[in-house]
Amino acid sequence: MKAELSPFTPGQPVPIEFFVGRVKEIEQLVSMIRAATAGKFRVGYVAGERGIGKSSLVSFVRHLAEREERTAGAHVFWGGVDSLPEMVRKIFDRLLKDSLEKPWYQKIRDLFGKHVKQIGLFGITVELDLADTEARTLVTGFAPSLRRLLAELKDDRRALLLILDDINGLAASVEFANWLKSFVDEVATSGNSLAACVLVVGLEQRRRQLIELQPSLARVFELVQIQRWSEEETKDFFARAFRNAQADVEPPALQTMVKFSGGIPVLAHEIGDAV
């Protein structure tokens, strides 16, 4: 097999066609999303050790929800984000970018008006251009902004799914912990339902860190705990990946790869790619 044809993607979310297992976790997440489509606001925390496949799982569920539950949304990576204005700017910028090829793109673009600018070669992508004062306004008006967005999309989509990934820079922030609790309280006490599901993705210690800063978050998060693959799930992953590359794997070789992967997806990708 040529190296450039390797179906493995070390350090990246698993391609949807190689996704295996996680039935219980998927059912839990889909249940939360279905509640959101019925107008019940949900906040979940997807926890697990490094390399366990958290980002791959939520990415898979996002595509599933868009197809089966008619959701709109975004998968936002917060690496390097350490302030609330930058946090909300990234959320709405990703919502704009992820809708670029969707039928409802123009509605979202119109919502942001002059703040959308064309970038890249031939202007084939877009960026949300917000001043600091405007970003700070979105921080305090986050829930009303989401409601306005949902109102614009009501003919196309039933709910919003926001995936907030890689929260390391904000997990130690008391400002973020208090903002998240205030956001949830505002939705709960407004008397106006919000058809949205927010999934925070991170290590278990980050969740505990946030709860130490704002103990009420312990009641806010619906915990989705990601476990290691079973031996059968790991075997299924390798078999599917090599089959996709039209490569045969003898049982002893397959068993060796399964053993040394230890049920950790990132190791399975590293080993598979090396093989």
Image (cartoon, rainbow, N blue to C red):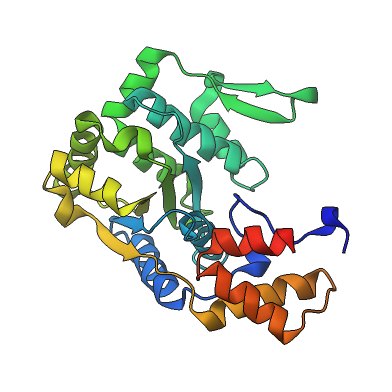
- Establish if 13 lies above or below 230: above
- Say which residue appears at 38% left-offset and 17% top-offset: 134
Circle count: 0
Which is more toward the observer, 110 or 12? 12
- Establish if 115 lies above or below 267: above
Q: Can residue 34 be seen in the rendering of this structure?
A: yes
Q: Can residue 184 be seen in the rendering of this structure?
A: no
- Say which residue appears at 21% left-offset and 37% top-offset: 177
> Horizontal placement of 22 versus 14: left or right?
left
> Horizontal placement of 31 versus 59: left or right?
left
Q: Quadrant of the N terminus?
A: bottom right
Which is more toward the observer, 96 or 154? 96
- Establish if 115 lies above or below 72: above
- Say which residue appears at 50% left-offset and 60% top-offset: 53
Which is more toward the observer, 136 or 150? 136
Name the residue furthest bottom.
251
x%, y% of residue 100?
64, 40
Name the residue furthest right.
2
Place residue 149 in its image quadrant. Answer: top left
Q: Quadrant of the C terminus?
A: bottom right
x%, y% of residue 169?
36, 33
x%, y% of residue 204?
30, 54
x%, y% of residue 122?
80, 24
